[in-house]
Image: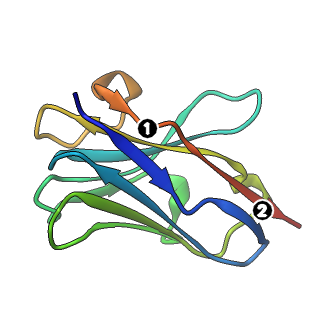
Amino acid sequence: QVQLVESGGGLVQAGGSLRLSCAASGRYNIGWFRQAPGKEREFVATVSWTGDQTFYADWVKGRFTISRDNAGNTVYLQMNSLKPEDTAVYYCAARSIRLLATMRSNYDYWGQGTQVTVSS
């Protein structure tokens, strides 16, 4: 069973930064998603199991960076220039198939989520 544990969420002022971590029990393609109250869960970014391929949602616009550590089992989401509309629960997800994907249905395992709140 794949285990994913997110951490690093919290409260930050607009314009600030946070780094989220996703500790996985193995090496997988990992995606970050977020869900704001009353909204659908949406794709943020994904990184390949090798770490050399990444893909972002258009709205990220260079503010967020996804990466993974050298061992490969921890994935990070560096979030800069945060806005109040970035407030959401952020989830990481793992995909068994080693191809990048942006749809929720493409991911097989999910973490419990970490809350990010950006104050204005």
Residue at 39% across / 54% down in the picture?
22
Between tags 2 and 1, which lies in front? 1
Residue 105 lies left or right of residue 2; in this view the side is right
Residue 41, quarter of picture: top right
Quadrant hosting residue 54: bottom left
Question: As drawn, is 58 to the left or to the right of 3?
Answer: right
Q: How many marks?
A: 2
Q: Residues within 10 Å of mark 1 (few under 14, many from 20)?
A: many
Label 2: which residue? Answer: 118
Which quadrant of the rendered structure holds the N terminus?
top left
Q: Residue at x 55, y 63 (%)?
A: 8
Under tag 2, what secondary structure? strand
Three-letter amino acid code at disc 2?
Val
Label 2 Cα neighbours within 10 Å, binned few <14 / some 14-19 / many ≥20: many
Q: Nearer the viewer, residue 7 or 84?
A: 7
Q: Position of residue 107 (x, y in %)?
A: 30, 29
On the image, numbered disc 1 is attached to which residue?
A: 111
Q: In the visual, does 38 lie left or right of 60? A: right
Left or right for 76, reference 99? right
Q: CA distance from mark 2 to mark 1?
A: 21 Å
Residue 91 higher or lower than 55, as above or below: above
